[in-house]
Image (cartoon, helix red, strand yellow):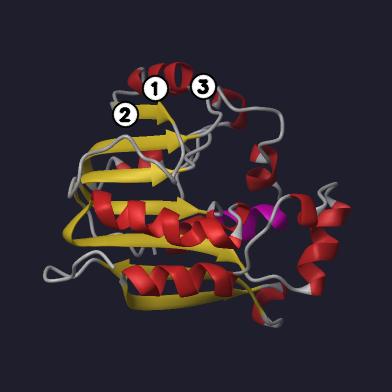
Amino acid sequence: MNRLCLLPLDEYIGVNHDDPLFLYYYPLVGKFYRKRIELCLNELKGGQRVLEIGFGAGLTFLNLQEEYDEIYGLDLTSDVELIAAMFRKRHIETHLQNGNVLEMPYPNDYFDSVLLISILEHLQPKEQETAFQEIFRVLKPGGQVVYGVPVERPLMVLAFRLLGYDIRKLHFSTENDVSKAAQKNLSLDNKIELKGLWGLSDPIYQICHLLKMSDQVAP
């Protein structure tokens, strides 16, 4: 498995104060945060263009530039100019915009891969189908979607509360809401469940890999 390549924490810029960047650097919690991204990245097959929806500070960009010719990113709040300039200094060219997965500013059949890590749970259940219709639209025939979402468990709710986050104010859709909408629009290729507590607990995170089949038409 490829490991997540991270810059020093103080080099990441352009995100608001609610972004939990610091958690990726903690000894135990950080291992889980990095692992979920690594599992998503390892599902990607590479290609010409990749779009990450909700890219935040660009934590995946060092890895993505190894597999794709062009990196695109869409995020509601990130400072796209600051982040693009920061990566340009590291000879990584990105195409970043502010925008919403529900109405994306890209042409049809444009991306080889679309990546969403801990994004879809923040949508309302009724918005999931619209999101996946848009994802379907911008994907090339034969393209892939990889997404990761938390599997809500009482232990996870408690862990977030200990970290100072009320999960009920952040997560509106369950993994089942997301999966139902995803598979209405795309074909499931693989599903991975990440367990907590060194693999001893029930799954607390789910990664799904879906395909837009070459002969598939929009529902």
Q: Which residue is denoted by mark 3 in the rendering?
A: 79
The structure residue drawn at horizontal position 53% and vertical position 36%, both measured from the top left corner, is 56
Disc 3 and disc 2: Cα gap in Å? Answer: 13 Å
Q: Is residue 77 magenta?
A: no
> How packed is label 2: few (under 14 Cα within 10 Å), some, or many (20 or more)?
many
Q: Which quarter of the rendered picture does the N terminus lie within?
A: bottom left
Closer to us: 78 or 128: 128
The structure residue drawn at horizontal position 34% and vertical position 76%, both measured from the top left corner, is 188
> How packed is label 1: few (under 14 Cα within 10 Å), some, or many (20 or more)?
many
Disc 3 element: loop
Which comes before the other along the chain, label 1 or label 2? 1
Task: Say if mark 1 contacts mark 2, CB within 8 Å.
Answer: yes
The structure residue drawn at horizontal position 52% and vertical position 67%, both measured from the top left corner, is 178
- Could you tell me residue 114's position as x and y percent? 33, 52
Q: Which mark is residue 84?
A: 1
Question: Looking at numbered disc 3 in the image, what kind of residue is underneath it?
Answer: Asp
Identify the main secondary structure in magenta.
Answer: helix
Closer to us: 142 or 4: 142
Q: Which quarter of the rendered picture does the C terminus lie within?
A: bottom left
- Could you tell me residue 33's position as x and y percent? 61, 55
Span highlighted in magenta in the image: 27-34
Disc 1 and disc 3: Cα gap in Å? Answer: 9 Å
Q: Which residue is denoted by mark 2 in the rendering?
A: 94
> How packed is label 3: few (under 14 Cα within 10 Å), some, or many (20 or more)?
some
Closer to us: 109 or 85: 109
